[in-house]
Image (cartoon, rainbow, N blue to C red):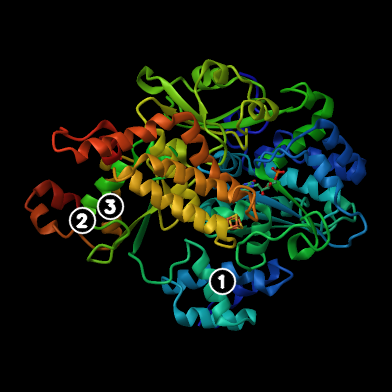
Amino acid sequence: MAEHILLRDLDIPDIRRFEVYTRHGGYEALRKVVTTMTPDDVINEVKKSNLRGRGGAGFPTGVKWSFIPRQEPIKYVVVNADESEPGTFKDRQILEGNPHQLIEGALIAAYAIQATAIYIYCRGEFWDLTHALDRHIEDARQAGFVGENILDSGWSCEVHTHLGAGAYICGEESALLNSLQGLLGQPRVRPPFPAQKGGGLYYEATVVNNVETLTNVPWIINNGADAYLQIGTPESPGPKIYCLSGHINRPGNYELPLGITFRELIYEHGGGIPDDRKLKAILPSGASGPVLPATDAVLDTPLTYEAVAKIGSTLGSASIILIDETVNMAWAGSKMTQFFAHESCGKCTPCREGTYWSRRRYDTLLAGRAAEKDIDILSDVAGQMTGLTLCALGEFAVNPVVWTIKHFRQDYLEYIQQAAAEEKPAARGKGKAARDAAAR
Amino acid sequence: MLKEKYADRIAAIFAKYPDKRSAMMPLLYLAQEEYGYVTPEALGEIAALIGVDPTQVRSISGFYTMFREEPKGKYWLQVCTDLPCALRGAEQFYQELLAELDVEDGGTTADGMFTVERVMCLAACDRAPVLQNNFHYHENLDMDKMRALIRQWREEAGQPAPDAAADSADPDDSAAG
Ligand SMILES: Cc1cc2nc3c(=O)[nH]c(=O)nc-3n(C[C@H](O)[C@H](O)[C@H](O)COP(=O)(O)O)c2cc1C
Ligand code: SF4
Ligand code: FES
């Protein structure tokens, strides 16, 4: 197997330690940019590499950096380490196993926009991890890579961590910034966008990037954008960490090029589905993106931003949840709806009320007290949320409802038919769907 | 008082940010560490340190699941039962854990030792079932591992199991205890 670019802890177990990281070329990319490149050189190289954001939206990173107004005296880089999407656990492995490469990548981003400080916003549950990260930052500071006058360049940049406290919405970048400012962790109205004066951290121009995104950057600087473009596809270049969870023999993180197929990932790398059961559904982007039925056409689709969009879903952060034939997808839809109802920040009515009512409908359905019209009510509620919410969480929340109904309506009917059968005294025992629900 | 007892730590927190208000969450964690939960007095102390109204501190602590506004068990167990974990048996594990500790969903054991709650995804789906005990991860769990952990935590707390009297009839067990 080729050497890893991101999960280098799999090749060099102790690489999380500063001495080991530097012994394997660590912080050479930072030295290179600070001593031989202008900020614009750095932005242009990252632009050329076509590195796309790994936090979910796939926005080109170099382009994002180029939006930052040069003349502003105070600018920030904020690292999004809130990782809370169901099925996502890649940033955690980077933070645990290869933290210096993230710190180095964040410093390069900070140099590119001439930021004065970096804040790494970690989800609160990464409590131990964040305290360890503080020590890693301290090691980098001791060596002169963090703080005043970095490598005698005249450029100074502090690096701090900040712990969240259990709120999925704080992964949304503007809510994250509010949370970091000690305000309620709710999204901001945009524009202004974070990159603009007035929209970022403390209302200064700010780059927000995901952990995995920034961890790519030192490699791009060391090896060049052209080498990076050799990996993956032109529209989706580079390596990606795929998180495999649910019904899969070998759950875990897999660093592989963008553009491999679902089939290769699931059956060759993930070891297939337990007990050779049939794969029923794939959630390519956790709970947030549309579910896909596991057809041959889907399985042969390459994992790129563009190809997954073409088949009606999103690659997101590639948190791939596998669901086998034993599962009723109405139950899965209800689980995801519970998630969004719990995580809605409550700022706008369609999302707050919509997720609440959908959850109640699912409770009725799973309890065997629903009729066929309830499926339409679920669709209607989802329809009333679409396009009317302040942030993307409201859009995400619609997906599990709409797409499980669209692809797996029969599963909903199973609960309903069974409810109808139980009304009749002659009906014997409980139906399969109710038994499944009871077992969960 | 936090202010006197943790003067250095508080100074270090404020030094991280250009705006005092950013100290809100770190100070809530500090208060929780000191008092076991975010007490009404703590809200006042934090408000005074930052220079805001206590109701503003209250709204922040109420927004996040990791700040607790009432006392919890000494061991606060948060079990993930979100979709990926549920596909790997987390719900059954959760029910067995509740039964083992004889506690309701979301409740605290009579001896005040354990609070058991469900939580959403903990970014450990590949190691389900998983829980956090006071924010520390325990992964790839099953009930055998869980019983061993519970025994260990009880010993740590000097609090033998409620049925320890019955157990101690067994010589092996009392030797281990
Ligand atoms: C509800 C919601 C939750 C999000 N959670 C995360 C997250 O946990 N981590 C993350 O990096 N991005 C998350 N994002 C995306 C961020 O808003 C932002 O696009 C991203 O951090 C930008 O970094 P990138 O360009 O490097 O991907 C979330 C977005 C939404 C709407
Ligand atoms: S869409 Fe939902 S999560 Fe987003 S701001 Fe509105 S209520 Fe909050
Ligand atoms: S679903 Fe349980 S840790 Fe992710």
Q: Looking at the rendering, which quadrant does residue B177 occupy?
A: bottom left
The span from disc 1 to disc 2 (Cα, nearest Å) is 34 Å
Q: Which mark is residue A243?
A: none
Looking at the picture, which amino acid does disc 3 mark? Answer: Ile
- Whether marks 1 and 3 lie on the same chain: yes
* Residue A187 shows in the view: yes
Q: Position of residue A418 (x, y in %)?
A: 27, 35
Q: Looking at the rendering, which quadrant does residue A188 occupy?
A: bottom right
Looking at the image, is A430 positioned above or below residue A99?
Answer: above
Looking at the image, is A429 positioned above or below residue B18?
Answer: above
Q: Nearer the viewer, mark 2 or mark 3?
A: 2
Q: Which residue is at 40% across, 26% downward?
A: A324
Q: Which mark is residue B102?
A: 2
Mark sitting earlier along the chain (2/3): 2
Which residue was labeled with disc 3? B150
In the figure, is residue A343 to the left or right of B108?
A: right
Which residue was labeled with disc 1? B27
Looking at the picture, which amino acid does disc 2 mark? Answer: Asp
Looking at the picture, which amino acid does disc 1 mark? Answer: Leu
The span from disc 2 to disc 3 (Cα, nearest Å) is 13 Å
Characterize the local packing of mark 3: few (<14), some (14-19) or many (20 or more) Cα atoms within 10 angstroms.
Answer: some
Q: Is the C-beta separation of discs 1 and 2 under 8 Å?
A: no
Nearest the viewer among B91 and B42 is: B91
- Whether marks 2 and 3 lie on the same chain: yes
Q: Position of residue A205 (x, y in %)?
A: 81, 58
In the figure, is residue A328 to the left or right of A142?
A: left
Nearest the viewer among A337 and B101 is: A337
Q: Chain of mark 1?
A: B
